[in-house]
Image (tube, rainbow, N blue to C red):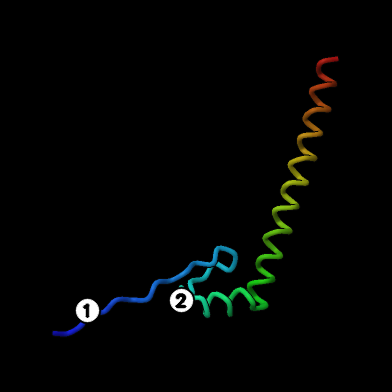
Amino acid sequence: MSERWVSNKKYYCSYCKIYIQDNKASRNIHEGGKKHKEAVEMFLRDVHRRSENKSKQDQETRAMLERIEQ
């Protein structure tokens, strides 16, 4: 009897938007790589920038509401 072929599982890196083999060695190599580290850093900068923009917009909205209420 022949063995049934089964593909290896894939892991999707949401920072780099790529699939890699789902095993410890492949993940460690990928996560230790320059491209992945830069992608994570860019993601975190974007999160920080969005939160700053949101807080600035909230402050502007509060100030506008205070002017309207007076």
Residue visible at 76% across and 45% down?
Answer: 53
Q: Which residue is mark 1?
A: 4
Quarter of the image for residue 35 reads bottom right
Q: CA distance from mark 1 to mark 2?
A: 20 Å
Quadrant for the N terminus in the image: bottom left
Q: Residue furthest left?
A: 1
**In the image: residue 70, left or right of residue 11:** right
Label 2 crowd (10 A; few <14 / some 14-19 / many >=20): some
Q: Which mark is first along the chain, 2 or 1?
A: 1
Label 1 crowd (10 A; few <14 / some 14-19 / many >=20): few
Q: Position of residue 6 (x, y in %)?
A: 29, 76
Quarter of the image for residue 32 reads bottom right
**In the image: residue 67, left or right of residue 39:** right
Q: Nearer the viewer, residue 45 or 29?
A: 29
Find out whether the residues at labels 1 and 2 contact each other: C-beta distance under 8 Å: no
Q: Nearer the viewer, residue 3 or 17?
A: 3
35 up-or-down from 59: above or below: below
- Total numbered labels placed on residues in the image: 2
Residue visible at 66% across and 68% down?
Answer: 39
Q: Position of residue 58 (x, y in %)?
A: 76, 34
| Amino acid beneath label 2 | Gln
Mark 2 secondary-structure assignment: strand
| Amino acid beneath label 1 | Arg
**In the image: residue 4, left or right of residue 35:** left
Quarter of the image for residue 9 reads bottom left
Residue visible at 77% across and 40% down?
Answer: 55
57 up-or-down from 26: above or below: above
- Identify the mark at residue 21; answer none if there is no mark: 2
**In the image: residue 31, left or right of residue 63:** left
Q: Position of residue 4 (x, y in %)?
A: 22, 78
Mark 1 secondary-structure assignment: loop
Residue visible at 85% across and 21% down?
Answer: 67
